[in-house]
Amino acid sequence: MVTMPKYQGRQTRILGKSFVFALLLSYTAFILGPFVWVGLISLRTTEEFYRNPYGLPTPAHFEKFAIAWTEYNYGRYFLNSMLVVGTAVVSAVVVGSMAAYCFAKFRFKFSEALFYLIFLSIMFPPQIRLISLYQILSQYRLLDTRTGLILVYISTQLTLTIFLLRDFFEAIPKDLLDAARIDGCTEWGIFWKIAFPITKPGLSAVAILNFVFLWTEFLFAVTFISSESKRTLPLGVIRFLGERYEDIGMVATGVMIAVIPILILYIVLSERFIQSMVIGAIKG
Amino acid sequence: MKRRFPAVAGFLIPAMALFVLFLLYPVVKTFWNSFYKVGPFRANFLGWGNYLEVLQDKTFWLAARHSGTWAVLSIVLEIGIAFLLSLALFNRIWLHRFFRTAWFTPVLIPYVVTGIIWLWIYNYDWGPLNTLLRALGLGSLAKPWLGSPHLALYCLIVASTWMWTGFNMVVLLTAMHSLPAEIFEAAEIDGASPFQKTVKIMVPLLRPTFSSLVVLCFVGKMRIFDLVWVTTGGGPLWATETVATYIYKRAFAWNVYDLGYPSALAVIWFIITFTMSLFLGKVIRGKEVEYW
């Protein structure tokens, strides 16, 4: 490099840069291509698809989304997912933040040991409790119910939620809380009126994280849910898969219904999505 | 402190109740089950019987090999590619923000959807992969990718790499941006080449990040289920059977009516995964590096 005449060095650099850029562009096509393709299929009928798998949706069959929603029951799956995941995310954040606040601001017997146990249990794979949860749920008649799935989902995300939120609560200055105590505020009031509201950024990051994990969850759902009317979206999406005459067009429409809500949120809030996933990785 | 006892209890009890009932108790129960033959109505104590059977279980060891291969290859592929990508973005190449957002997208979709997408990509008749090969005149290389026993596993590994590389990239990029810029400036003054700066300074400083990513990737692939379940179901001829799919089949799909044996499988696999991830994390993290 040192002996090379200057202009030549610059040329190689530009050439190198364009080469790298071309590589990155093809990688992007590799990542986004499948989404575009499935998106196009979702607007075409299966006959059109078999005539040309890579054709454009002319005319675009937007009515397929309505058909999927009503006739193929995707409306039901969607509402089930919203209900189960929504309830679980809100409960995990509320219940988890209370516990996290407690670990952050109070010292009590075994608090360190208990917190360590919670931290360790983040490492538990779902398989280590899948079978016994099946027994427990069936014992309490919670098998094949949305309530059962919600309870399992809350517990799945609870440990990570507590672990991540403790740091956010620890950042609250003690003086602020003490001032409220002197003003005669109850501990309960302090939490809801002061600690909880000022931790909003942390809470929303953890909520996004939990939402992504649960919206995409499959193993617990497929094990505990058996009736058609209680399926969540990941279960709905595979329902029409692998039949003799595979209705590719409709499966693609279902896939889009499952994916669009998260993609819209991602496009609007991409920075926050990325950040909350990174927090989960670095600390967890 | 005593005065605050009711407050502590109030804050803690709901979370602890859920934690104990749906996390701790089930885990303990799985350990318990693993020593029994658990039928629908009664359980018979077997002692170490299930564990001895696991040692003889060829399918389990095959599945363990598949899961292990998956974990190791994924670590190399995902983190290796992610590192190169994040280097490009760290140098603020044109469109870097768009690239970052785009590459991260697959992380947010369900594994099930990844499975369907790749099932179609690998389709023999009309899948893009074979279509591309035929268009390039390499039609003889076209195959039923997921249908061939010695390729299927690797094909699925490509799919999971497609999904997760963006995640590793974003974490590495964040870590790179948090490194102190002065170190790189100092190295530049000392005449370090960009390559030297990357290998001798950046990589050692990123060791803790690499260590978390390796552990996360390892743990994630050792438990992989959804992707296999919707694409190959473990086939063809056990070629993509993972420990997770095998446990599921033994517990719920084969009508053997014994929840004890799959519990023993789950316990063994958990212990193996757990100790190996602790070990991996420790080894890669290594000694703290300090440059200032």
Image (cartoon, rainbow, N blue to C red):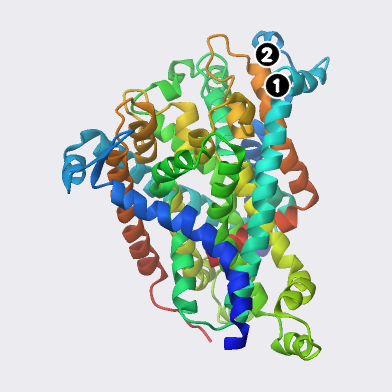
SS category of the residue bearing label 2:
helix
Three-letter amino acid code of the residue under disc 2: Phe
- Near mark 1 (Cα within 10 A), the count class, few <14, some 14-19 or many ≥20, is many
Answer whether residue A254 is visible to the viewer in this image: yes
Residue B111 drawn above or below residue B16 = above
Residue A36 position within the rendered picture, expressed as x and y whole percent measured from the top left: 71, 31
Left or right: where B216 falls relative to A208: left
Q: Decide which of A3, A34 is in the foreground and name it.
A: A34
Q: Residue at x 76, y 71 (%)?
A: A192
Q: Decide which of A262, A154 is in the foreground and name it.
A: A154
Q: Residue at x 76, y 20 (%)?
A: A70
Q: Which residue is mark 1?
A: A41
SS category of the residue bearing label 1:
helix
Q: Which residue is mark 2?
A: A49
Three-letter amino acid code of the residue under disc 1: Ile
Q: Quadrant of residue B177?
A: bottom right
